[in-house]
Amino acid sequence: MLAAVGLLGVVVATMSAKMRSLPISEPLLGLTAGIVLGPQVTGVFTFPSLAVEQSVLHEASRILLAISVMAVALRYPFGDIRRHGRALLILLLIVLPVMALVSAGLGWAILGMPVAAAALFGAAISPTDPVLASSVVTGEAAERDLPARDRQLLSVESGSNDGLALPLVLVALAVAGPLGAGDAFVESVWQVAGGVALGAGIGWLGGRALRLGARHGAAVGAPALFFTVVLALGILGAAGLLRVDGVLAVFVGGVAFNIVGTGSERAAEVPIDEAINRFAVLPLFVLFGAALPWRQWHELGWQVAVLVLAVLVLRRIPIVLLMKRPLRLRTPDALYLGWFGPVGVSALFYLTLEADRLGANETVLAAGSLVLACSTIAFGVTGVLGRTLYRRVAVQAPADER
């Protein structure tokens, strides 16, 4: 696996200047390599099934999400993030829960999932993913073709809703298992409030420490560039010790660091965070590709293909279109943000979290993993095409929408 990841890293480094202009992404490369090298094709990897190796994939996705949401928090100046506060609140408090309900309803209606299983499925795949989203919002081509507001909204939404989806998952666990409604509420408040407080505190201290080190010439060059990665892992570890929402804590910590850090410090750290984010996805997606539950997919029958198509089309696009006026989006922007809100690493994180808390539900894991795999393919292939179509349609939009 290490050899495969190393070879993929060389491929990504060689193609890095062209990756954003080709119908391909780093997660898609990793997924394809895992499938080809896995037991269903060449058998180079004898990696066990997703249900067996859920703990490994959970920890790997947890670490990757921490690095990704830290990169999102540092990608734009805090002033830009603050300007989108109203739209972000709508996306997080209205669009996110409705996406969970729609996804759960599709699982119940199409696959005949019990209500409890459908709730687990819908909650797990509801958050948009910063890893897959980064391929369509970063790079010169995205900056040239897409408005800054669209890129910033998609990035910050995907960074923040990964952690804020936890209460939805806890509600689903309350429906499906022994966790009562009161316990779910208490745990949600503790996890979210604790994560925000922890992240804000450590992020502020980290920013002050870096500025103090820079003042004395001790935080220059590579150590300063890698500082935010170490900070993200530190916040994640502290959150695990306190049993609070680690992904949310890291994102809040990144925002606090962004506020405290100077503009030059933030700008210097963005490239290294984005570079690590691009290469760090490879091991996880190789493992995921090798562990895909092909037998369980086959047992679900043709209905699972209908479910995947319905989730990709109905989970997000109609909701964003309905909310385009409160979000102050033109129709082309609403369609673009509706489509490119992918199911990704965050879904794997929550699917494996649910499996750890309740035991593996093979139907939920199989359906969720197929949605994740198809989402990775769909958004990797359509990234360039979607950006091109947006550019053409946006130019032709009616005057009152421009």
Image: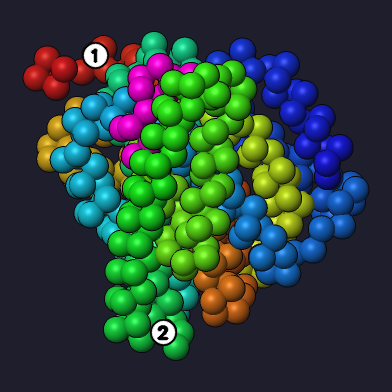
Q: Is residue 85 above or below residue 288?
A: above
Q: Which mark is residue 396?
A: 1
Q: For marks 1 and 2, give the CA distance.
A: 52 Å
Q: Secondary structure at mark 1?
A: helix
Q: Residue furthest front?
A: 216
Comparing 370 with 193, the one in front is: 193
Left of 148 or right of it: where is 367?
right
Q: Residues within 10 Å of mark 1 (few under 14, many from 20)?
A: few
Image quadrant where one finds the N terminus: top right
Residue drawn at point x = 21 percent, y = 47 percent: 89
Comparing 315 with 193, the one in front is: 193
Report the amino acid beneath label 2: Leu
Q: Secondary structure at mark 2?
A: loop
Per the rendered image, the range of residues in magenta is 256-268
Are the residues tagged 1 and 2 within 8 Å (C-beta)?
A: no
Mark 1, mark 2: which one is toward the viewer?
A: 2
